[in-house]
Amino acid sequence: MPVFSRKPPHFHPAHDELVGELVRHLQPAEGDVLPELPRIIEESVRLSPALRVFVIWDRWHGVAERERDEIILEAYDQARGRPEMARIAVVRGLTPQEALELGATHLLKD
Amino acid sequence: MRASLPTHDSIQEFEGARHDRLWDGMTLWLEGHTDSAAGAVYLLGYCVEMALKCAYFRVLGLQISDPITALELRAAQAKAVAYGVTARTEAYHSVQFWCDLLREQRRAIGLPFESIFEQQLIDEVTIVYARWSIEMRYKTNYTTSATLDRVLKAVEWFDLNYSRLYSP
């Protein structure tokens, strides 16, 4: 009987591509001109090494919330290493529209 | 009563609840009625869940009063996936899930448990996992006094070793 290797069913077809794009933003090569989005916001937690990470990105359309979290963490793991990823206490991927709807406008400004 | 409850969860609330449920469970155990065994196990299982959950958030670096919201819990689940933890969260109550996540979190930051202690932790969690579930509250009492005694022994181990779970 043939053996089929499949990723977990919740994986979005662009999962690896999205991870790769985030890695590019987290670890830009010299001279790399990056688009405005994804917008990565790292908030430090008071008196703590922990981080809250928000990624505003129009490419989240059609990607389940849970998978967005996993994509962001995978990207941090690849770009910054496991100890840095381990610092993340909150991770959230939102489209610009979702951020507006949540009233999280501070995530859209510099 | 409802209005006086804190508005958010935090390490200090979980740790306070851990102590309260320990005494609640011990009180039922001291009564010694077989009819109370399920109630006692149900309360004592919470102590283990709280200990593991608090240890994870302490290792993560949260302060004891920092809010632990649905966002922190969701991130914990995503990190478990990233670490390769396969235990299900069981609505974030699974002692197996929190134990595996805690072990991997410590490993990720370069503070793995010493191997003998880690094996003891796994053994005690396995014992509690097999005997306690959040779903017990909806079930008839099938708990024996032997089960209660073993869970109590595990809870005592957690009480004795709690600070080791999150200390460097």
Image: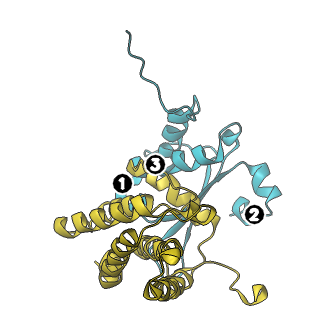
Chain colours: A cyan, B yellow
Horizontal and vertical percent position of residue A101:
82, 56
Judging by the rendered image, the residue that carries numbered circle 1 is A81
Asked if badges 2 and 3 are on one and the same chain, I answer: no
* Front residue of A72 and A40: A72
Q: Which amino acid does label 3 sit on?
A: Val
Horizontal and vertical percent position of residue B86:
42, 47
Kindly identify which chain the residue marked by label 3 belongs to: B
Per the model, the C-alpha gap separating discs 2 and 1 is 28 Å
Answer with mark 2 or mark 1, whichever residue precedes in sequence. 1
Left or right relative to B162: residue B22: right
* Front residue of B6 and B138: B138
Dividing the picture into quarters, in which one does residue B151 lie? bottom left
Per the model, the C-alpha gap separating discs 2 and 3 is 27 Å
Given this view, does label 2 or label 3 mark the residue nearer the observer?
3
Which mark identifies residue B81? 3
- Few, some or many C-alpha atoms within 10 Å of disc 1 (few <14, some 14-19, many ≥20)? few
- The secondary element bearing badge 2 is classed as loop
Given this view, does label 1 or label 3 mark the residue nearer the observer?
3
Horizontal and vertical percent position of residue B43:
52, 76
Q: Residue B141, relative to residue A74: is it above or below?
A: below
Asked if badges 1 and 3 are on one and the same chain, I answer: no
- Few, some or many C-alpha atoms within 10 Å of disc 3 (few <14, some 14-19, many ≥20)? some
- Few, some or many C-alpha atoms within 10 Å of disc 2 (few <14, some 14-19, many ≥20)? some
Q: In which quarter of the image is the C terminus of chain A?
A: bottom right
Judging by the rendered image, the residue that carries numbered circle 2 is A104
Q: Residue B88, relative to residue B104: is it above or below?
A: above
Kindly identify which chain the residue marked by label 2 belongs to: A
Q: What residue type is labelled 2?
A: Ala
